[in-house]
Image (spheres, grey):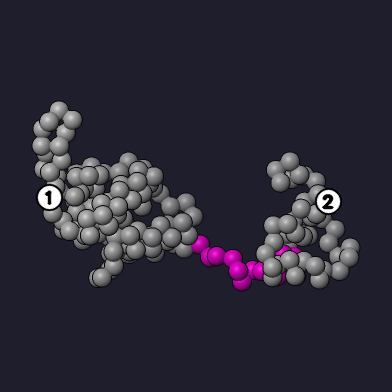
Amino acid sequence: MALSHFNDTLMCRLFPSSLGEVALRWFNQLGRRTINSWIEMAEAFVARFITNSRKTREMDALLTMKLEDNETIKEYSTRFWETYNDIDGCDEEVAIRTFKLGLPPDTGLRQSLIKRPAPTVAKLMHIIDQFIRVEEDGGGIASAQTVVQPNGENIKLNKYYYL
């Protein structure tokens, strides 16, 4: 639609192809020649479907998050990122620190993040995903594992050192 951005007629003609069942039904019941520009179309659509829009959340919703009892790191992570995405202009550094502080102090992931802080949200997400995979593969057991290096040396690692 980028090429047609300044062409109201074309935008109005392309618009229905982006609609779901309910919105398409609404669009099809519009009277002929009731919409004269793309701006009018956008305003009519928003006026009709305003209840379906998401309200942005404030930063305090993120700052108060923590890993709940009987909640897995995966569930906490999912809840955290959903909240993070609902906040406009959330600072990455604040998000990284908040995620870490929401973990109990004895958690392997928190210990790992203290030793090697994630520099970006993308890196934090990668570290979390790795931790979850290790946790799921190991059944959540925090035992040490011996890894044989290519040079023949054996190294003992706790699961949070995989990150």
The structure residue drawn at horizontal position 27% and vertical position 57%, both measured from the top left corner, is 136
Q: Is residue 130 left or right of residue 27?
A: left
| Residue 130 coordinates in the image, percent (x, y) | 30, 48
Q: What is the secondary structure assignment of the residue under circle 2? A: helix
Amino acid type, residue under disc 2 in the picture: Thr
Residue 78, above or below 161: below
Q: Please name the residue that numbered disc 2 is placed on.
A: 9
Amino acid type, residue under disc 1 in the picture: Ala
The residue range painted magenta reads 44-56
Identify the main secondary structure in magenta: helix
Residue 154, above or below 41: above
Mark 2 Cα-neighbour bin, 10 Å: few <14, some 14–19, many ≥20: few
Q: Does the image show residue 68?
A: yes
Q: Nearer the viewer, residue 119 or 122?
A: 122
Measured in 3D between alpha carbons, the distance from the residue under mark 1 to the one under mark 2, in whole angstroms, is 65 Å
| Residue 72 coordinates in the image, percent (x, y) | 28, 64
Q: Please name the residue that numbered disc 1 is placed on.
A: 144
